[in-house]
Image (cartoon, rainbow, N blue to C red):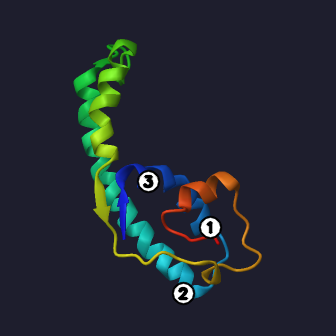
Amino acid sequence: MKVTLGQIKGAESALGTLSNQALPIQTAYKISRLIKQVISEISDFEEHRKRLVEKFGTTDPDTGIITVTEENIPLFSEALRPLLETEVTLNFDKLGPKDLPESFNISSSDILQLEPFIDFV
């Protein structure tokens, strides 16, 4: 399956929520394999995002924390956009409604974030 790094980053929290649900064993296994791949992609993404923060940010002398200054936010966002739009291939087949239990509870916002990975209809 092909997804963008932006979709993966956006689904990070929702995947965590999903992994804490009581799921059929096969679905739980598939989700755990997906999460392992997602963790790897997010780790790589964060390395590159950090470089951009360092490039467009300033270091607070007291805390050592680097933040992107307000005037550099547009430049940072412009530089980050191609990274977020980068397509990656995950070894994962999209789940369908039959893979989820009837008692499955998840928020509407999580559903939106999980749409690249689960066909809810």
User: For mark 1, what is the residue?
Assistant: 20
Closer to viewer: mark 2 or mark 3: 3
Q: Indicate the amino acid at tag 3.
A: Gln
User: For mark 2, what is the residue?
Assistant: 26
Give the spatial CA distance, label 1 vs label 3.
20 Å
- Local SS, label 2: helix
The label on residue 7 is: 3
Q: Indicate the amino acid at tag 1.
A: Asn
Q: Pinpoint residue 8: horizontal percent, then vertical percent.
A: 42, 56
Q: In the figure, is residue 118 to the left or right of 82?
A: right
Closer to viewer: mark 1 or mark 2: 2
Closer to viewer: mark 1 or mark 3: 3
Check if mark 1's residue and mark 2's residue have beta carbons within 8 Å. no
Viewer-closest of 71 and 33? 71
- Local SS, label 1: loop
Q: Residues within 10 Å of mark 1 (few under 14, many from 20)?
A: few
Disc with the residue nearer the chain's start (1 vs 3): 3
Disc with the residue nearer the chain's start (1 vs 2): 1
Residue that extends furthest to the right in the rendered view of this protein = 103
Query: Against 42, is 78 above or below?
Result: above
Query: Against 12, is 84 above or below?
Result: above
- Local SS, label 3: helix
The quadrant of the picture occupied by the N terminus is bottom left
Give the residue at x 25% y 27%. Answer: 54
Give the residue at x 57% y 57%. Answer: 14
